[in-house]
Amino acid sequence: MVAAVLAECGSTGAWSDGGIVRGYFPRPAARGTEREAFRAAWRRFTGDPCPYRVAVRTVADVDWHARWRRDVRAERVTPRLWVAPPAAPPPEEDLAAGGAVIWIEPGEGFGTGSHPTTRALLRWLDREARLGRVLDVGTGSGVLALAALARGARLALALDLDPRALANAAANRDLNRPAGLALVQGSLSAVAPAARFDCVLANLDMRTLPGLIDGLAAHCEEGGRVGVAGVLAAERWELVERAGAAGLALLDESADPDPSGEGTWWSGWFTPARRD
Ligand code: SAH
């Protein structure tokens, strides 16, 4: 309720933290008026006088993007696979032992190797003996396609709807210099209907996956793999059922806690069911 009233007063974001609700406003109004504005809005909303203590503080503007870039560090995803920003390479002794590094410049594409959804798919990619041709739907930073190529895939077609993600993926292609990476703006409809891939990857969400799952399955070679992430544990059942209806059988699955401690990500590794 407090967050709703803050929004009514023009707050751009609110969250509750240890019994205090904080709301951010873009710029300070005339000093002292915010408190009254909040109390008046509370009364309008609820019909009651505001029972809370309201404090107003001016805080320095923070470049969140710059802060995030500074904090991105090398991630060890498997014993031999790292994802790292050029500014923070993995320890040399680990690389001397034969590790591969996917270099990712922190940018507007999702996928710096720290998120459980990306990591689940990377672990499976690292385990797969025959990657061949790979389709990456929603490539973000390009991390999955780049890792697949580093692990021996011959070709990766990486799609994203967001031109900012593609710009980041292109920068990461230049950093990693793989052979065989195609970056295309678009979604599954950009893929020739008859094209088949040995491995199809989609780290998306439950708004998009149910509508795409038939297409993901259709573009997968017999005996190939379809990896899906971006699904919450509570949504697992629905996704597995949809995938089953699309002719995909579950081979392996993974449940990984969100770093915030709230919720669990579910990821699935499928193969087209045999049609005997
Ligand atoms: N593959 C990366 C990034 C996943 S984030 C990783 O695993 O870390 C999901 C990306 O999918 C975003 O960049 C978003 O722009 C893109 N996206 C969302 N819906 C899409 C769709 N229908 N088709 C293609 N890309 C999509």
Image: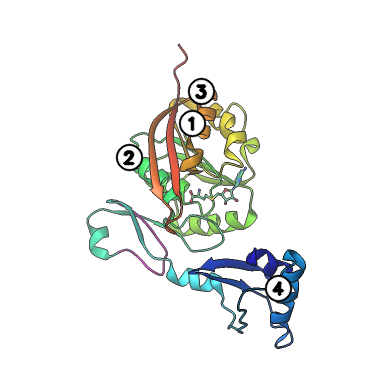
Report the predominant secondary structure element of the magenta stretch. loop
191 falls in the magenta region: no
Q: Earlier in the sequence, mark 4 or mark 2?
A: 4
Q: Which mark is residue 127?
A: 2
How far apart in space, not on screen, are marks 1 and 4 (Cα)?
A: 50 Å
Q: Residue at x 34, y 43 (%)?
A: 126
Viewer-nearest of discs 4 and 3: 4
Q: Could you tell me residue 214's position as x and y percent?
A: 58, 29
**Magenta residue span:** 81-90
Write down the residue under mark 1: 240
Write down the residue under mark 4: 49
Viewer-nearest of discs 4 and 2: 4
Q: Residue at x 49, y 41 (%)?
A: 234
Instruction: Say whether residue 269 is visible.
Output: yes
How far apart in space, not on screen, are marks 3 and 1 (Cα)?
A: 10 Å
Work out whether residue 210 or residue 69 is closer to the camera in this orientation and state it: 210
Instruction: Say whether residue 196 is visible.
Output: no
Q: Are marks 4 and 3 in contact (CB under 8 Å)?
A: no
SS state under label 4: loop
Write down the residue under mark 3: 247
